[in-house]
Image: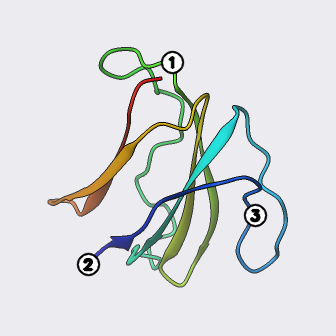
């Protein structure tokens, strides 16, 4: 079962090492996710290359993955403007959707 929370951060960092996360955009929505199948060496996940999506939002700039350690994955969504967002689960396969409001 996946678990997560989201928050905007001024200066995101990699868990464990404390190294800063390099990002494009003006703000970062940090979404730590728990319950990832860390036994799979090549999990299916977005690489952030197709972010146009429905409506061609101009707010989301990129998705950056931080460390994956013991089932916990750091996900950073970089945006132009801090806007409301929602995060919700889907199943078969288990995954979350990060829905960021347009600027």
Q: Quadrant of residue 74?
A: bottom right
Horizontal and vertical percent for residue 50? 46, 26
Pointers 1 and 2 in contact (C-beta within 8 Å)? no
The residue located at (51%, 68%) in the rendering is 41
Per the model, the C-alpha gap separating discs 1 and 2 is 32 Å
Which residue is drawn at the image coordinates 53% and 30% (left, top)?
49
Q: Quadrant of the N terminus?
A: bottom left
Name the residue located 38 percent from the left edge and 78 percent from the top edge.
Answer: 35
> Which of pointers 3 and 1 lies earlier in the amino acid sequence?
3
Instruction: Return the residue at label 2.
Output: 1
**Residue 4 occupies quadrant:** bottom left
Residue placed under numbered mark 3 in the picture: 13
Query: Mark 3 against mark 2, which lies toward the viewer?
Result: 3
Rendering coords of residue 60 (x, y %)? 52, 30
Q: Position of residue 97 (x, y in %)?
A: 31, 49
Please give the label number shown on residue 58.
1
Examine the rendered structure and indicate whether residue 63 appears above or below residue 5: above
**If you read the primary sequence from the N terminus, does the residue marked by circle 1 or circle 2 appear first?**
2
């Amino acid at each position: 079962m996946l678990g997560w929370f989201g928050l905007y951060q001024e200066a995101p960092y990699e868990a464990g090492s404390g190294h800063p996360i390099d990002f494009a955009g003006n703000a970062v929505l940090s979404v730590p996710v728990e319950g990832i199948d860390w036994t799979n060496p090549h999990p299916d996940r977005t690489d952030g290359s197709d972010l146009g999506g429905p409506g061609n939002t101009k707010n989301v700039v990129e998705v950056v993955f931080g460390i994956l350690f013991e089932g916990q994955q750091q996900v950073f969504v970089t945006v132009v403007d801090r806007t409301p967002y929602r995060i919700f689960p889907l199943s078969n396969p288990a995954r979350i959707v990060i829905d960021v409001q347009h600027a």
